[in-house]
Amino acid sequence: MMTKKKPSIFYGNLVCLKPLNSGDQKQVRAWDKDPEVSEYREVYRLGDKKLQRISFGIYDQKSLKLIGDIGIGLIDPKNKHAEIGMTI
């Protein structure tokens, strides 16, 4: 019998990191459209099969509001190289 693996959640003092889900897409798209944010933000679409990327939402622990995201992208296992980005 195969068991379904639960997503990892990482807790800090004020925030927690957990995988982004489809309910977060509206907020992420709003950040992508905001010129002050998108000027410095690489735009990756959730579910884009062409890009290897691991993303987590950054949530306020008290309100559970999505306040940012952090991700590792452009993963190149052969050359052991990747890029990290964060938006708050």
Image (cartoon, rainbow, N blue to C red):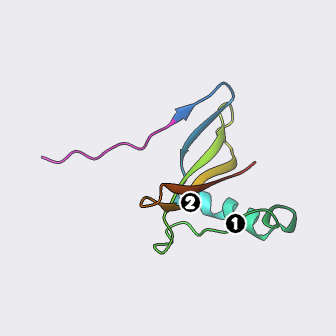
Vertical placement of residue 29 versus 60, above or below: below
From which residue to which does the magenta span run? 1-9
| Numbered marks: total | 2
Task: Determine the residue positioned at 55% across, 57% down.
Answer: 82
Q: Main secondary structure of the magenta part?
A: loop
Q: Amino acid at mark 1?
A: Glu
Label ID, residue 72 = none
Q: Give the image location of residue 80, x and y in percent.
A: 48, 54
18 left or right of 38 in image: left
In the rendered image, which residue does mark 1 sit on?
Answer: 42
Residue at point 69%, 28% (across, down)? 14
Q: Amino acid at mark 2?
A: Gly
Q: Give the image location of residue 13, x and y in percent.
A: 66, 24
Helix, strand or loop under label 1: loop
Report the side of 36 relative to 78 (left or right): right
Q: Residue at x 53, y 34 (%)?
A: 10
Report, in whole angstroms, how far the alpha carbon at label 1 lies from the one at label 2: 10 Å
Q: Residues within 10 Å of mark 1 (few under 14, many from 20)?
A: few
User: Which numbered marker is on residue 73?
Assistant: 2
In-front residue for pair 14/41: 41
| Marks 1 and 2, the one that precedes in the sequence | 1
* Residue 87 in the image, given as x and y percentages of width and height: 73, 52
Q: Are marks 1 and 2 in contact (CB under 8 Å)?
A: yes
Quarter of the image where one finds residue 29? bottom right
